[in-house]
Amino acid sequence: MRTKTMRTAASFAMLLLLAITFSLGHAQAAAATDMETRLLHSRAFESILWSVPLMNYKAIKDGLKNGGGVNYGDVAYHSKIQTAKLEIPTGNSVPYIMAYWTLKDGPMVIEIPSQTADVALFGVFMDSWQRPLADVGGKGRDGGVGAKYLLLPPNYQVGELPEGYLVLQSKTYEGYFLLRPGTVDNSAQSMAKQAAWAKTINIYPFSKAAKPPKTKHVDIYGKSIHAIVDYDATYFGKLQQILNTEIIEEKDLAMLGILNDVGIRKGGTFKMDASQKNIYEAAASEAHQYVMKLFYETLPPHFYTDKQWTTLNLPGSVATQFSYVQPSFVDIDTRGGMYFGVFSSTERLGRATFYLTGAKDAKGQWLEGGQNYKLSVPANVPVNQYWSVITHDNETASWIKGTPEGKQMVGSLTDGLKKNKDGSIDIYFGPKAPKGEGVNWMPTVKGKRFFLLFRFYGPKTPLFTKSWQLPDVQKVK
């Protein structure tokens, strides 16, 4: 009897030991799986934060190609002021002229014509990491008289430089330009003149400079162009594509190890299973929220000590020429925040343009699309050319979808703009226009937060000395 009892106890102990062992093993396996999930999420998040400026360029390139039929070396222009159909970060109130190129097959020539009595120019050449190569136009390298720009690929041995060119050395194979033609107004006649001017821009390989091929010019006005980054699981496949076409700089080699864990390898093909897709989707959403916070709250310096307006001169922007490569580190947070909200930059901030950003009202509350607001712009805005204020969606930094075409901007070139007796101008924002204020009103959408970008073209000294100041946005009934 005693022997049987001992055997039963031993069996029970063995079963208990097996149960404990199984439970511990299961817990350890679950912990390991959880750790792997968290690690993959973390590395996907960091991959996004690191690559925002490059993916910003890819979104522009893909948008122009897929929505506008614009290929490498074509010139895209607008025959009229662009509308919300051009989804692009902080789109402007001038008819953009754009092109993108590749230097993989050798140097390229870009002929920028001289400014005219009817068309002034401010523009910039950028590489694919959103670093400025040169300002062009009146405040740029050519001083407004036009030039032939010769773009050299990375590590290109040119020998004796040819005469008659302004030579630019690129660190990347791909790049683009953004040109902003300035006109006296937005009339049909002025738009026709700037469109004709755009058609005199030429792009061709340097190897064919003796007999340049004809450049294709594409009118993208009215075309639906999605040129903003999608922060979802598709991000990673697109990142794989652009990395396959671009050079990898030495400063980025360590990042390739993290990308490798995400499934992105130079020259490879990105694939993900269902569980990975869920992780990447969550990481992309989290990264989106993070860069938004950086752009709107954490990084932008206030322009005035007693107002909500901030500037796009994020820490390190000017000192690093918008590369954000510091002496001892690459500031991927500031770079990611910056290029969530904008595309392109400039060699010399403040010479040709200056921007103020407003995402909050006078009481420091977010601008909400379902509320009504007023901005009173004082007389004598300090600009040599013109000014404008534009509404943008907080989530995309692009135009606000669901608003009437052509109502995303009010400025000094707006036809019929109402002025007060003292020369000041009241601009209204909200779901409905105040009675009699349709021209001075900009529509917003309930449920969507928005921000304002007040642009000064040809900024004058009183803006920087602050003897002229832009008041805060006021919430009204």
Image (cartoon, rainbow, N blue to C red):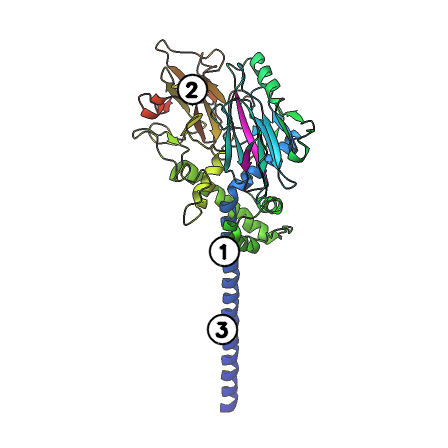
Return the residue at label 3. Answer: 20
* Distance from the alpha carbon under mark 1 to that under mark 3: 26 Å
Mark 3 or mark 2, which has the lower sequence index? 3
Query: Label 1 crowding class (10 Å Cα cut-off): few <14, some 14-19, many 20+?
Result: some
| Residue plotted at (56% across, 37% down) | 57
What number is the disc on residue 309? none
Contact, mark 3 vs mark 2 (Cβ under 8 Å): no
* Circle number at residue 428: 2
The residue tagged with tag 3: helix, strand or loop? helix
187 or 158, which is in the foreground? 158
Within 10 Å of disc 2 (Cα), the crowding (few <14, some 14-19, many 20+) is many
| Residue 231 visible within the image | no
At 59% from the left edge and 39% from the top edge, which residue is drawn? Answer: 174
Label count reads 3
* Helix, strand or loop for disc 2: strand
In this orientation, which residue lies closer to the viewer: 442 or 348?
348
Direction from residue 159 to residue 20 in the image, left or right: left
Magenta stretch encompasses residue 172: yes
Q: State the CA–CA distance, disc 3 to disc 2.
A: 69 Å
First in residue order: circle 2 vs circle 1: 1
Q: Is residue 377 magenta?
A: no
Q: Which mark is residue 38?
A: 1
Label 1's element? helix
Question: Which region of the structure is painted magenta?
Answer: 167-181
